[in-house]
Image (cartoon, grey):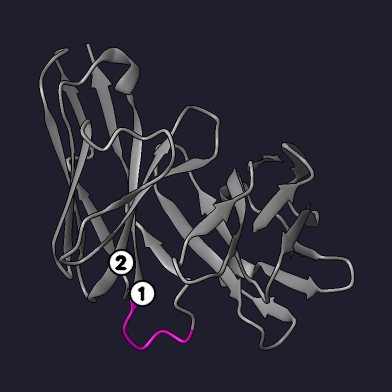
């Protein structure tokens, strides 16, 4: 149980284009989804927190107009990197938390990540 | 406020020998503590979590961790390392209304044959 998928697993795009990454909880509903960014050999950096049906809360330094997050349902959140540039190349990981029935609301279940390369 | 410190960026052990990955935390409230493992180019897999029940927490793949409040530690151990344990391990502290997690910097575990 508690499986989270991401699509695509990797994507290569040209500079200036937009890329959409999907995050789905496959066998549970999650009230909260999180988006992280991870640079090579570094830890995860939280970008934003989103609750279903409301606007995402972005961490300091993260451009909300560049990283658009939509959380349309309890099983789907999307991250759109708009007008991507080479410096946006990174490993993007989503997670789902706030699972109904979980004793600890802190537990997050992570997706497998999406490798974005911007040329 | 909360923070977590992983004391070793790299740990190298021989196959079949014990593993110890060290983690210290600070939190202004009763924390939830987690260990996650990440294999190359993969997402994070939950190994175990502590949520104020038993202080010794058993996880998957033979790993366990002990919560020591007096030492503010949550070290991860395994009696006998396997080659497949080679990966990056993250100690994580959670808590608060936002359900946000604070990640340690990670410990790269290498298992030598």
- Whether residue B105 is in magenta: the answer is no
Q: Is residue A119 above or below residue A90?
A: above
Judged from this view, the residue extending furthest toward the right is B70
- The residue under label 2 is A32
Q: Residue at x 17, y 12 (%)?
A: A15
Coordinates of residue A106 in the picture (x, y in percent) = 48, 71
Q: Residue at x 65, y 77 (%)?
A: B58
Number of residues whose C-alpha sits closer than 10 Å to that of mark 1, classed few (under 14), some (14–19) or many (20 or more): many
Which disc, if any, is residue A44? Answer: none
Q: Residue at x 41, y 44 (%)?
A: A59
Where, quadrant-wise, is the N terminus of chain B in this rendering? bottom right
Magenta segment, which residues? A99-103
Cβ atoms under marks 1 and 2 closer than 8 Å = yes
Give whichever of B107, B86 is nearer the camera.
B107
Q: Residue A88's image quarter?
A: top left
- The residue under label 1 is A98
- Residues beneath discs 1 and 2 located on the same chain: yes
Where, quadrant-wise, is the C terminus of chain B in this rendering? top right
Coordinates of residue A8 in the picture (x, y in percent) = 17, 40
Q: How much space separates mark 1 and mark 2, taking CA atoms?
A: 6 Å
Number of residues whose C-alpha sits closer than 10 Å to that of mark 2, classed few (under 14), some (14–19) or many (20 or more): many
The chain letter for the residue carrying disc 1 is A
Q: Is residue A49 above or below residue A96?
A: above
Q: Residue B34's image quarter?
A: bottom right
Coordinates of residue A110 in the picture (x, y in percent) = 37, 57
Q: Residue A68's image quarter?
A: top left
Q: SS of the residue at dot 2?
A: strand
The chain letter for the residue carrying disc 2 is A
Give whichever of A107, A3 is nearer the camera.
A107
Q: Residue at x 19, y 67 (%)?
A: A52
- Whether residue A101 is in magenta: the answer is yes
């Amino acid at each position: 149980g508690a499986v989270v998928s991401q699509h695509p697993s990797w994507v290569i795009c040209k500079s200036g284009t937009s890329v959409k990454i999907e995050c789905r909880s496959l066998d549970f509903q999650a009230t909260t989804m999180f988006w992280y960014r991870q640079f090579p050999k570094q830890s995860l950096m939280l970008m934003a927190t989103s609750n279903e049906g409301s606007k995402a809360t972005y961490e300091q330094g993260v451009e909300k107009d560049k990283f658009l997050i939509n959380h349309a349902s309890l099983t789907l959140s999307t991250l759109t990197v708009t007008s991507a540039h080479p410096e946006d190349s990174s490993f993007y990981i989503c997670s789902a938390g706030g699972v109904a029935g979980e004793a600890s609301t802190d537990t997050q279940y992570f997706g497998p990540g999406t490798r974005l390369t911007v040329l | 406020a909360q923070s977590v410190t992983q004391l070793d960026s790299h740990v190298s052990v021989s196959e079949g020998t014990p593993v110890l990955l060290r983690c210290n935390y600070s939190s202004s409230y009763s924390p939830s503590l987690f260990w996650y493992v990440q294999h190359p180019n993969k997402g994070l897999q939950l190994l175990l979590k502590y949520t104020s029940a038993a202080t010794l927490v058993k996880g998957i793949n033979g790993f366990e961790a002990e919560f020591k409040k007096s030492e503010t530690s949550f070290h991860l151990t395994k009696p006998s390392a396997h080659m497949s344990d080679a990966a990056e391990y993250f100690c994580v502290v959670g808590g608060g209304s936002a359900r946000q997690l604070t990640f340690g910097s990670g410990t790269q575990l290498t298992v030598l044959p």
